[in-house]
Image (cartoon, helix red, strand yellow):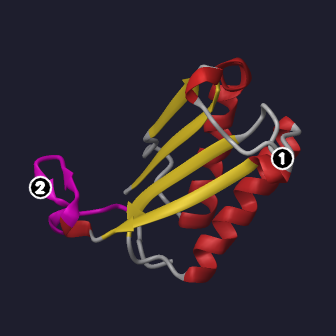
Amino acid sequence: MVQIKVYGLADKLNPIKSELSNVIHASLVKVLQISPDKRFHRLFPLDKTNFYYPSDRTDNYLIIEISMFEGRSVETKKQLIRLLIQQINAQFKIPIYDIEITIFETPKANWGIRGLPGDELQLNYKIEV
């Protein structure tokens, strides 16, 4: 299970949110080997009065939060971060210092999905990659 939250200024995020979701999802499928039909993304376009960030960031600043079952290797997580930054930079010309990614890992038993604790689910993809 992988869920994505993306925060950015509304006037910058809204025009690219569909394509950005596609870039993020393609990276998750490639690196984490999740099933292509498992897209759980939420985008939060914010007014400038609700989004504070350091002065060395531009209005393109994005925060991407990834919540997922624990079990992926450190190298896999680093590979995902690198690929996301590279793809977002290449596709949208957002400077790399304007892209911040945080991965939150949770034990499967701490998720409730389809009426079950996550550790009781039958998944059609591997977690240990």
Is the residue marked by circle 1 packed among few (<14), some (14-19), or many (20+) residues within 10 Å? few
- Residue drawn at x 41%, y 61% is 68
- Magenta stretch contains residue 26: no
Q: On the image, numbered disc 1 is attached to which residue?
A: 56
At label 2, counting other C-alpha atoms closer than 10 Å, the crowd grade (few under 14, some 14-19, many 20 or more) is few
Residue 19 position, x and y percent, is: 69, 30
What kind of residue is marked 2? Leu
- Which residue appears at 28% of the width and 71% of the height? 107
Query: Is residue 120 located in the magenta-colored stretch of the structure?
Result: yes
Q: For residue 77, which quarter of the picture?
A: bottom right
Quickly name the residue at label 2: 116
Instruction: Please tell me which of labels 1 and 2 falls first in the chain.
Output: 1
Q: The N terminus is located in which quarter?
A: bottom left
- Specify the segment rendered in magenta: 110-124
- Could you tell whether 105 is left or right of 119 in the image? right
Q: Nearer the viewer, mark 1 or mark 2?
A: 1
Amino acid type assigned to the residue bearing label 1 in the image? Asp
